[in-house]
Image (cartoon, grey):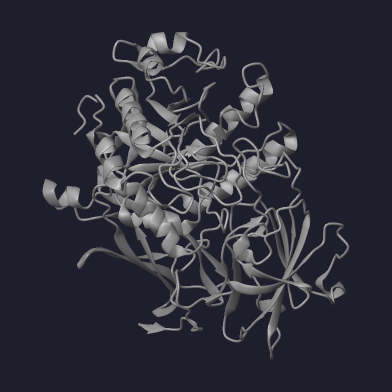
Amino acid sequence: MTSNVPAAHTPTGAYPRPLMQRAHWVSLDGAWQFRFDDEKEFSHPREIDDWPLQINVPFPVESEASGIGDRGFHQGFWYQREFEADPAGGRILLHFGAVDYRAKVWVNGTYVVSHEGGHTPFTADITHALNPDGPQVVTVFVEDDPHDLTKPRGKQDWQLEPHSIWYPRTSGIWQTVWLERVSCTYLQKIRWTPHVEGFALTFEARVVGDPADDLSVEVVISHRDRVLAHDRYRVIDSEADRRIILSDPGIDDYRNELLWSPERPQLLDATVRLLRGNEVIDEFKSYTALRSISVLRDRVMLNGRPYVLKMVLDQGYWPDTMLAAPDDDALRRDVELAKAMGFNGVRKHQKIENPRYLYWADKLGLLVWEEMPSAYRFTRTAIKRLIKEWSEVIERDYSHPCVIMWVPFNESWGVPELPNIGAQQHAVAALYHLTKTLDPTRPVIGNDGWESSATDVIGIHDYDADSDHLRQRYGPEVSPQQLFDRRRPGGRILTLDGYPHRGQPIVLTEFGGIAYEKIPQEGVPEVWGYSTAEAEEEFLTKFQILIEVVTHTALFSGYCYTQFADTFQEANGLLTADRVPKIPLEEISRCVSASRMYIPGAA
């Protein structure tokens, strides 16, 4: 077997797309020329001869780490930098991890791609635009209207100064920009689907590029030093789609050892090659896992067994870098901290997290709920934007074993008259069914928090700080029927008319929110939470009581405590914004680990 895989400079650092890791790539992160263009003065990069500023990509314009740190209202941004790329002998792909909100890209003055949506990646084949000699130039124009409430924006504030539960905006490039060289025919994407019950995996691959005959895809799957499968499939109509049956050892100990869970995050390594005849023309590393997630009656099931969800809500912000992580070590550290506090999962709140975070959650063992950042007006434009971007989210993250739940709506944001307007009810139902269509393997919460309709799990948000009130509302003597017949504080109903509780699992997906400002935040004059503590001992006591109350019930299949870390004016984290524990990690872990929910059949 011969190889004709193109070579290129290989940088140090974390590969931005962990599920398809080619050996050679080039990061374009670092210093770019920059200028504001709020009046849309320029329509083409050749019109610009003055670049007054420099920005550090991939940090958003509003962040201190970007070198700009401007949190004012801006609508247009230009970026430009030189790079080296030899167009001979293959194709050059230019990747953007995420650009908020609408991007247009030129290479050497030739338009190559545009993309709308602030949280999902896009790629351009720029081979045709490259110069045969000398440096290349990439230019990006970004439009991001800070006042537009019909675009998915999550926690990005539309007011000049952050207020309530909304934070500074994230504009422009905020995830890695990078190049890779591929052959003229290459694998564009793959998808893994585990089947625990059959000890099998479905592998799907899409081939693009120049037409070619005699193409096949080779897949080698291994666990540690043991090869579990080594198969080769013919490419038909640019696709390879096969079920890979793994050798079932028939011994429970080894069979269970191969299953992925937070307690035993067993990943299966994969090498994928594209061949023309016996010549390798594309090759990369990947991974997958044997893991199933489902609901059965009133319980969440992991690998066919009832599983108690002990999660923490994570906003995914950092003080100096905003939505962008400072580096890969920071993403890994966040996963490690969540696990060190005793939690087995996180609810990523109003953010589509960097794929590198999902990689570390896959590798280290942490469940992740993915939630679509909300728009805040209900219009046809808002729903079309939501559908497009949410579909891209599912496509990007489908193969990560850590992802166990999809949440397209939160607290009726974007559908504010959900109980009364049929079109808004149809929107939630449509996104629920679309999600189930694009990924039938995972549960979906149509609208988390209250006013549930189409959903596999009912999520409840309740920040009542009075533990006696919580006991009366959710205690051992309360039945599901009593719970759903009542109205919650604030007048929110738990389920819409026509959508009674059908026995689905119930999860307390937001509670707590105790504010304790252990270290005053610079630049944040006034902080708040849903309740307060004045000292470390009081904070620990209140946290412990809340955990005990919500776990001493048979109503819930799990919980999600608010929150992981302080986020700007919200000082209700278990950690400070800089990830300093407010109380010892072992004390938090002791409270979380000691909690015992009554789940029949659970270990």
Q: Residue at x 55, y 54 (%)?
A: 319
Question: For the view shown, which residue lies furthest in the front direction?
Answer: 535
Residue 144, horizontal then vertical, whole percent: 74, 52
Question: Does any portion of residue 298 appear in the rendered image?
Answer: no
Question: Does any portion of residue 147 appear in the rendered image?
Answer: yes
Q: Nearer the viewer, residue 494 or 341?
A: 341
1 above or below 146?
below
Q: Quadrant of the C terminus?
A: top left
480 above or below 150?
above
Image quadrant in which you'd find residue 482: top left
Q: Nearer the viewer, residue 500 or 87?
A: 500
Q: Nearer the viewer, residue 163 or 169?
A: 163
Q: Residue at x 39, y 27 (%)?
A: 507
Left or right side of 378 for 13: left
Left or right side of 78 for 548: left
Left or right side of 255 for 49: right
466 above or below 170?
above
Q: Nearer the viewer, residue 33 or 230?
A: 33
Q: How many marks?
A: 0
Residue 434, horizontal then vertical, whole percent: 55, 37
Residue 14, horizontal then vertical, whole percent: 45, 69
Image quadrant in which you'd find residue 313: top left
Q: Residue at x 28, y 34 (%)?
A: 307
Residue 168, horizontal then vertical, whole percent: 64, 48
Q: Quadrant of the N terminus?
A: bottom left
Left or right side of 383 for 6: left
